[in-house]
Amino acid sequence: MNSADLERRVASALHDLVDDPVTSPAMFERVADRVRRGRRRRAAGAASAVVVVAALATGGLLLRPASDPATGPAATASCPDKDPGAPRNSRGSDSDGALVAGTPVVATICRYYGLNQPALPGTLARSAMARDEAAAALASALNGGHRIPEGARYNCPADFGASIRIIFGYRRGAAVTVWVDPAGCRTATNGMTALFTSQAAQRQLTNLVGE
Amino acid sequence: MAEPDGFREYVVARQTALLRTAWLLTGDWQQAEDLVQAALAKVWPRWQRLTAQGEGPEGYVRRVIATTYLTWRRRRWWAERPTTSVPDVSQTGDVLAGIDLRDALGRILRQLPPAQRTVLVLRFYEDLSVEQTAAVLGCSGGTVKSQTAKALDKLKDVVSMGELR
């Protein structure tokens, strides 16, 4: 086989190799979201630099965040590179409170690998951000899951340890974290209240961070 | 930052093609989508200038995808485990031969060093010339040729076993 023939065959093989991708109708929104997050990071970096310079110039150590998380506008969280883990009391309900209280305006979703996946368990696989109606819809879908009876025991053989961490942010800056088991028993907890993850929530999470 | 004119339409129209290219580079659909999103986010602020200059965005987008992929590969561990030997390939000519070859080609492609894989995708999937590939990657034509030759050398055994279906 001569060089030109080899190149032609490789070109043909590469085209045959690629399946049709599942395209996302939200691709543009996700790109726009990345652009917004990038601008915020740059702005935060610039603000931090100004604070550092000012502190050094005055000889003080007044290094503070740019805004007070208790009263500032809805803060967007970022995903840790490693899964920080769910709280111990994550199974079974010991509270009648909602999983996600009120109406969040932003949700940062972090999906972490489990076993048998292309990176070490607990490594950040993908992240996404939902805002406004999308964040509220995700909260509502999570709250729509069936309550896990207190003291109930379930066998979840297909749980390979993957996890999703969702940080809901509110207009006044407070945050609520929800941990989701995307496989196995498919539960969601905020550490106090635990629910089975509704199919609507599962669909939304799959759309946002894959599966 | 306001949405640039025509950017949304471009994303909708071209996302399938961009995802295919990104998949050939990453070998994983989720990483491919991540790569395309990251590349398009870099293109966004330059979109008006690109279109105002009258040049199509395609070349620049392709360049950003390739260079972003190479940068990520330098910074991230993507859990690929190269093997010392090329996987066995079926030579039986049965109905599964095409699938075996396709699978083998995919595996060999994933085992190529990132630079060789990128050159291969740009030259033979995107159908760029040596000069165009060199311009995209910011390297010399000689580098493109040598990387291409090395990549083809690793692929020729499996490709010579037959046309893939």
Image (cartoon, coloured by chain):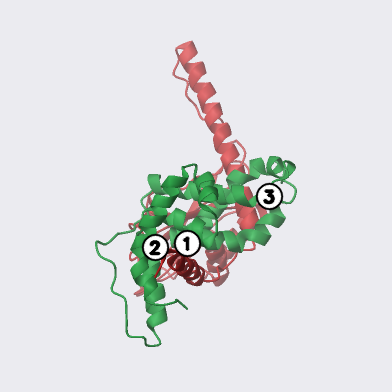
Chain colours: A red, B green
Among numbered discs 2 and 1, the one appearing first in the sequence: 1
Query: What number is the disc on residue B140?
Result: none
Residue type at the position of mark 2: Leu
Report in which chain the residue with disc 2 lies: B
Q: Are marks 1 and 3 on the same chain?
A: yes
Q: Position of residue B124 (x, y in %)?
A: 50, 61
**Disc 2 target residue:** B109
Q: Position of residue A27 (x, y in %)?
A: 62, 58
Q: Residue at x 49, y 27 (%)?
A: A64
Q: Position of residue A139 (x, y in %)?
A: 58, 59
Q: Nearer the viewer, residue A141 or A19?
A: A19
Report in which chain the residue with disc 1 lies: B
Q: Measure how far apart labels 2 and 3 are at the Cα level.
A: 29 Å
Q: Is residue B50 left or right of residue B63?
A: right
Q: Are marks 2 and 1 on the same chain?
A: yes
Q: Is residue A87 left or right of residue A32?
A: left
Circles 2 and 1: CB atoms closer than 8 Å: yes
- Up/down of A199 relative to B22, above or below: below
Query: What number is the disc on residue B56?
Result: 3
Residue type at the position of mark 1: Leu
Circles 1 and 3: CB atoms closer than 8 Å: no
Query: What number is the disc on residue B24?
Result: 1
Q: In the displayed orientation, state which residue is furthest to the bottom.
A: B94
Single out the mark in the foreground, 1 or 3. 3
Among numbered discs 2 and 3, the one appearing first in the sequence: 3
Say what secondary structure mark 1 lies in.
helix
Q: In the displayed orientation, state which residue is furthest to the left.
A: B84
Disc 2 crowd rating (10 Å Cα; few below 14, some 14-19, many 20+) is many
